[in-house]
């Protein structure tokens, strides 16, 4: 009997935790909490609104924010669009009051998620100047690089907390201090960071933060944007029709999805410390099991990273990636790049060739990864190494 495919793609999405599912189901069906949260005139809507606000508090608590600073969206992609476009358009509106107002300047990096990259390119086409910072050899964007790129007209910096392909962690605290001292806003994409490392927005100089439920054992289709005090009144809505969410995001709130996101974030807060320790142990076990493969290397900083995500390049070009796909669910790049069958823009920015990028796999671990999964994954990778031809072995002797 063929063994089931092992799941090692938690960075792409996570299964919804059963405890979260139960919370969501309670918001469905005629006997559930199905009311429209905006229908304040009756008990059905009022009860739904209570569930929404409890979830808002749960999300805020995990990241050290106030509940009133959390704006519901359809996911981190929409959150990042709202942050970048919303800030740029609000600035342009203010600048229009002055003759000859300039479009301004944004800083981001070459290794951001496509939600940020494509949005920044759209703004660039509309006249906003964009600086695309290159990562260092460890896959990090340094505070010094950000400082060197700041200009008098820089109004926004947008960077990841955790890179979705490498697992590297940028020093957002120091970057934030420098950006704030300059007077610009800082947007951080934390989709890959929430629930994997501590975040305290009450202590960080971060003005906007994108969050996602489905990266943290919650449902797809729901996310949030943190809007801090400096960013309030400096973001224009992108979806109109009712003025929901403090006028920043119109549309009927999906109570079951919002409650699911809240439950997922609350659960993450409970298990964060122990889960990080366990994932680090599994990470070490996996690296140990693959250490004997000649030419295998890990991309990104060996220390400034989360344990959940590992990017391995097989520099001897001896991994049968297609065959491995029959045994493991993994990624060769981000889900967005995979959909277009393109080499990873992150790996190319690090200096890898397209061929080397094609010999790279991202293995991401999660809540339901077990020791036996690590052992089977290591065995599968070894089994999918292409053995050199007999004549090549003979010549090397």
Image (cartoon, rainbow, N blue to C red):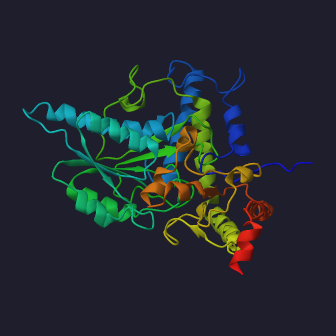
How far from the left and from the top, in percent, is residue 103?
19, 38
Give left or right: position of 23 versus 47. Answer: right
The quadrant where residue 349 appears: bottom left
Residue at figure coordinates x 30%, y 63% from the top left: 145
Vertical relation: 315 (above or below) 111:
below
How far from the left and from the top, in percent, is residue 372?
81, 62
Give left or right: position of 272 versus 288. Answer: left
How far from the left and from the top, in percent, is residue 299?
53, 65
The quadrant where residue 88 appears: top left
Residue at figure coordinates x 37%, y 31% from the top left: 248
Of residues 392 and 353, the one drawn nearer to the viewer in this rendering? 392
Give left or right: position of 283 versus 147. Answer: right
Give left or right: position of 228 versus 88. Answer: right
How far from the left and from the top, in percent, is residue 198?
51, 61
Find the residue positioned furthest to the right.
Answer: 1
Quadrant location of the C terminus in the rendered image:
bottom right
Of residues 357 and 247, the one drawn nearer to the viewer in this rendering? 357
Find the residue positioned furthest to the bottom.
Answer: 397
Of residues 65 and 163, the one drawn nearer to the viewer in this rendering? 163
Residue at figure coordinates x 60%, y 34% from the top left: 257
Residue 300 seen in the figure: yes
What is the tally of numbered marks visible in this picture?
A: 0
Vertical relation: 162 (above or below) 130:
below
């Amino acid at each position: 009997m063929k063994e089931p495919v092992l799941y090692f793609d938690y960075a792409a999405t996570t299964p919804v935790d059963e405890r979260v599912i139960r919370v969501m189901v309670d918001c469905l069906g005629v006997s559930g909490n199905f009311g429209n949260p905006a229908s304040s005139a009756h008990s059905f809507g009022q009860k739904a609104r209570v569930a929404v606000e409890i979830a808002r508090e749960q999300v805020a608590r995990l990241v050290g924010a106030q509940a009133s600073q959390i704006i519901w969206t359809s996911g981190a992609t929409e959150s990042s669009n709202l942050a970048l476009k919303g800030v740029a358009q609000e600035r342009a509106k203010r600048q229009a009051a002055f003759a000859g107002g300039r479009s301004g300047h944004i800083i981001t990096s070459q290794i951001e998620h496509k939600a940020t990259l494509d949005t920044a390119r759209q703004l660039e086409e509309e006249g906003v100047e964009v600086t695309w910072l290159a990562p260092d050899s460890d896959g990090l964007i340094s505070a010094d690089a950000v400082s060197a790129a700041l200009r008098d007209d820089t109004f926004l910096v947008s960077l990841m907390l955790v890179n979705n392909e490498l697992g590297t962690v940028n020093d957002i605290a120091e970057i934030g201090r420098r950006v704030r001292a300059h007077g610009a806003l800082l947007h951080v994409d934390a989709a890959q960071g929430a629930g994997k490392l501590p975040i305290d927005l009450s202590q960080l100089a971060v003005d906007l933060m994108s969050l996602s439920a489905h990266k943290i054992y919650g449902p797809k289709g729901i996310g949030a944007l943190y809007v801090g005090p400096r960013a309030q009144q400096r973001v224009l809505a992108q979806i109109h029709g009712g003025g929901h969410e403090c006028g920043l995001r119109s549309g009927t709130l999906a109570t079951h999805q919002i409650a699911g996101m809240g439950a997922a974030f609350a659960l993450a807060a409970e298990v964060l410390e122990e889960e990080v320790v366990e994932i680090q142990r599994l990470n070490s076990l996996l690296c140990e099991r693959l250490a004997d493969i000649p030419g295998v290397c890990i991309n990104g900083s060996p220390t400034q990273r989360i344990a959940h995500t590992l990017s391995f390049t097989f520099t001897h070009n001896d991994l049968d990636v297609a065959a491995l796909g029959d045994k493991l669910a993994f990624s060769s790049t981000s889900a967005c790049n995979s959909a277009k069958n393109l080499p990873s823009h992150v790996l190319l920015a690090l200096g890898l060739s397209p061929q080397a990028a094609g010999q790279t796999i991202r293995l991401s671990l999660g809540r339901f990864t077990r020791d036996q999964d690590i052992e089977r994954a290591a065995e599968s990778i070894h089994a999918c190494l292409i053995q050199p031809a007999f004549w090549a072995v003979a010549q090397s002797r």
